[in-house]
Image (spheres, rainbow, N blue to C red):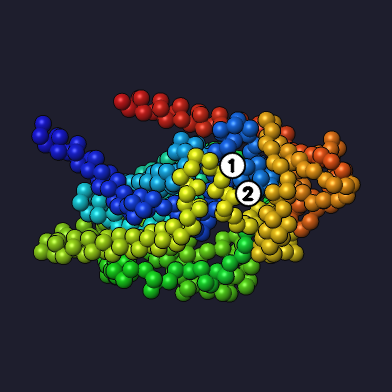
Amino acid sequence: MKIKKIRQFNLYLPYIIFAIGVLLLLSYQIQNKITIIVGDGYFHFSRIYDAAQQIKTGYFNYFQTNWGFDQSGRIINAVYGPFFAYLMGLILLICGSWFRFQIVTTFIISMVAVSGMYHVLQKIKPNLVINTLLALTYLFKITTWNNGPTFGAVSYAVFPYIILCAVRMIQNEDKPINWLQLALTMSVVGQIHLMSTMMGALMLVPFAIVGFIQTKNRKSMILNLIGAVGLTLLLTANIWLAISYFKFIDPLGNPIGTNMANSTINFAELPFLLNVFMLAQLIYVVFNFKRSKLNTTITLVALVFILMGSALFPWNWIQTEFPVLKETFQVPRRFFIIGFSLIVAASTITIQNLLKAKVECKYAICGFVLVVLLANFNYSLRVNSFYGINSSMNKPVQKITYSSQLGELFKYINMPAPDYLPENKKMEGSEKAKIYQLQLINHKNSFNHQVQKDGTLKLTWQAKKDSKTQLPIVMYRRSKLNVNQKYSYISKNEIGMPVVRQHKGLNEAVLAYQAPSWWKVMLIIVALSWLCVIIYLVYLKCRRL
């Protein structure tokens, strides 16, 4: 009984340690009561706030952003993880303030990340102590959700679960692909972040090739792959259909372009011991490449992605030849997320092999991992403290983040993000941002905004005389504008802001987006598909029990 209790305790012990580790990372922010809003913070807070307001009021609109982004009616969430936005919006409503929301969501996302990596390590080569330490090393290096928040943190959280599918392709020669596991993993990631899905699919390719070469059941593997792809397309139809629709039928513009050569990983900025850790893993595989096919494959794939995310890759030439990548992929250091995740996964094989080969080095190896872990922890604390100190300087914003009036935040902090404005191939994203600031943000307070039950956006304003005026809203090809009971507008500027005729006195305009008739049918099919999969999973669980 005593042994049984110890084993049961050991099952939960890593997760208790992980929770303590996450709280330590958040300790500075919690102690100083700071809400960090830097980087992409405004962008994601704005779209999450819009989803929260839709849930709160029941006035849903899948396309128009009626509360966030200056109540301009822009299309954002429809092409950027809509279901995840609604989930985060629900959490925001439950938390009641931006500070509590950031702490809670950072804790959840970080726990998902570190637990996923621990699960990967245990799948590769079980070892309670080593794998707990390595998972903590991963936790203390990843970008956390509160430091931005950027979706790099979300990528770090979901990639371990994609790596599980990759590991299976090498480990399980009889059935390299479990179609349900692969489909569910990629579908969940797809509903969260499309870029992570694309990078994850790219990462799986070399593992699938190796798995296909070594398996004797190649026909079965192909059929399982087809089944996984088919189910993934069904469960994420709202994502890829939206991307296709807004690419070819009602085109959206890209975000601001970046200099990709300047957006790579700088190894000098990483903790020195982390570089040593990654280099040691590579050296071990070079001299022991025949010992473990899994270790060699994971490490070599990791090396490729780390190089692709660094300045060693010819990004200057690539962005010159394919300039569209500057506005779509934007940041090559995203590849480092994959590379580092794989390095940590493979290192458990190396470390455990070394411990078996040279027992006298056991304490030295464990000590080295501990030192790397502490170096990463110190690095993360410094980053968190830096962002915290910079955010705390804006005291009016900090005061608002404790308020239950969630929308007040956007009266004090605003960024003219040009992402997904109507396409204008003649204009750079930075030019769109300037127009958006000058013509929309600076004049939005002259109009009263009201969201209606049917999800449309109503603007009212007073005019001193009959004349023309520009409304602080954005129209797309299928947007419909009713001005003073008539569907009309005179013209639109470069970013889709309409110019209309106003008459003396009170005026009103109602903005709606008319989605194609098949859209609701598609959403119902996606929802029913998820419901059927969930029921099937429950059935499998009950049958096993």
Instruction: Tell me if I can see residue 422 in this picture.
Output: no
Q: Residue at x 68, y 58 (%)?
A: 437
The mark nearer the N terminus, 2 or 1, is 1
Q: Quadrant of residue 361?
A: bottom left
Q: CA distance from mark 2 to mark 1?
A: 8 Å
In the image, residue 101 lies at what x, y percent? 44, 43
Q: Are marks 2 and 1 in contact (CB under 8 Å)?
A: yes
Q: Which residue is identified by label 2?
A: 69
Direction from residue 466 to residue 193 in the image, left or right: left
Element under disc 1? helix
Element under disc 2? helix
Direction from residue 369 to residue 527 in the image, left or right: right
Q: Nearer the viewer, residue 118 or 486?
A: 486
Question: How packed is label 1: few (under 14 Cα within 10 Å), some, or many (20 or more)?
Answer: many
Task: Judge whether 161 appears above or below 271 on screen.
Answer: above
In the image, residue 174 lies at what x, y percent? 36, 44
Q: Residue at x 23, y 40 (%)?
A: 11
Residue type marked 1: Asp
Q: Quadrant of the C terminus?
A: top left
Residue type marked 2: Phe
Q: Quadrant of the N terminus?
A: top left
Q: Residue at x 75, y 52 (%)?
A: 496
In the image, residue 426 lies at what x, y percent? 75, 64
Question: How packed is label 2: few (under 14 Cα within 10 Å), some, or many (20 or more)?
Answer: many
Task: Judge whether 187 appears above or below 207 on screen.
Answer: above
In the image, residue 504 lies at what x, y percent? 87, 43
Q: Nearer the viewer, residue 208 or 242?
A: 242
Can you name the residue that lies furthest to the front here? 464
Q: Which residue is identified by label 1?
A: 50
Residue 131's mark?
none
Q: Nearer the viewer, residue 231 or 501?
A: 501
Q: Residue at x 60, y 30 (%)?
A: 58
